[in-house]
Image (cartoon, grey):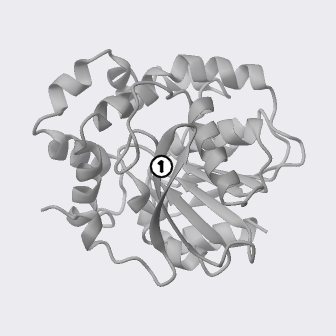
Amino acid sequence: MRFSQDAVQLPPSFEHRSAIVNDVNLHYVIGGKALDSAPLMLLIHGFPQNWWCWNSVIAGLGERYTVVAPDLKGVGLSDKPASGYTKREMAADLHALVESLHGAPAHIVGHDIGGMIAYAYASRYDARSLTIIDVTIPGIGDWDQVIADPHVWHFAFHQKRDLPEALIVGGREHVYISSFINQQTFRRGSISLPDISEYVEAYKHPGAFRCAMEMYRQFPQDAIDNRSAGRLPEKLPVLAIGGEKRWAGRVGERLATVSSNVTSVSIPDAAHFVAEEQPERFIEAMIQFCR
């Protein structure tokens, strides 16, 4: 079943837009409070998802913030250049998007690979706050131990040159993405079949799966970049969110190695996909933290 962009019913005040930043056309959804009337909150998705992973929370967050949820470069309706997938480069694209909206400094929120990009953003640009959701950051904390853990087997697989694309693209996208998501979800059914079909469509665009794998292939460079950047700004509030059934408090423990201003939250009855598995608890945590 195809759950197309045309079929998506956005909450009132939200709309699809696009912007050319750093010579890349980025698709994004924007809504909630009017620009200049409230802080901007940038929501950065991870793999294997697109902006739609925030669909259960954007209306609630939009009561307090101007919410911007882009398709990352390489995914969905955004451009898919051959290069530019270090998290530092991807953060530069999103910073340019925020600047184009005159929304800086913004609350920067990232899940999965989006959390890695959010970290790179906050290490280079001004931000109101930084929220990292259920992910480890290249080069930070116990990174070297994590990448040897069989639970993150896909890190190595996705970095293998050309192989994932050869095995998956061309008809096996749904099998791979649905299995990938269900393996890391505690509340089965919270990510529905139409949701998964939306993600499959986002990665069936020509070049999209290759671009996603390039995000993983840049992990070694990302680790170098993050280590060279040093500690996060001392006054930056950092929220570490982990799903109780996955990373839980370990997200905060890792970030505490680079910041003394970390608040750690473990969301009950959730694994990796916190915003979709427990949207109300996620919104509550965000509103309590992001001032």
Please report the residue visible at 35 percent of the width from the left and 63 percent of the height from the top: 187
Which quadrant holds the C terminus? bottom right
Q: Is residue 221 above or below residue 167?
A: above
The kind of secondary structure element at disc 1 is strand
Is 231 on the left-hand or right-hand side of 186? right
Please report the residue visible at 72 percent of the width from the left and 60 percent of the height from the top: 102
Label 1 is placed on what type of residue? Answer: Leu
Q: Position of residue 189 (x, y in %)?
A: 27, 66
Residue 179 versus residue 95: which sits nearer the camera? Answer: 95
Q: Is residue 98 above or below residue 159?
A: below
Q: Total label count?
A: 1
**Few, some or many residues within 10 Å of mark 1 (<14, 14–19, 20+):** many
Q: Is residue 202 visible?
A: yes
Q: Residue furthest right?
A: 235
What is the quadrant of residue 43 in the picture? Answer: bottom right
Is 178 on the left-hand or right-hand side of 99? left
**Residue named by callout 1:** 26
Q: Position of residue 202 (x, y in %)?
A: 29, 50
Please report the residue visible at 59 percent of the width from the left and 41 percent of the height from the top: 93
Q: Position of residue 177 (x, y in %)?
A: 25, 45
Is 191 on the left-hand or right-hand side of 241? left
Is 175 on the left-hand or right-hand side of 102? left
Residue 188 versus residue 69: which sits nearer the camera? Answer: 69
Q: Position of residue 5 (x, y in %)?
A: 29, 64
Please report the residue visible at 38 percent of the width from the left and 20 percent of the height from the top: 159
Residue 193 versus residue 197: which sits nearer the camera? Answer: 197
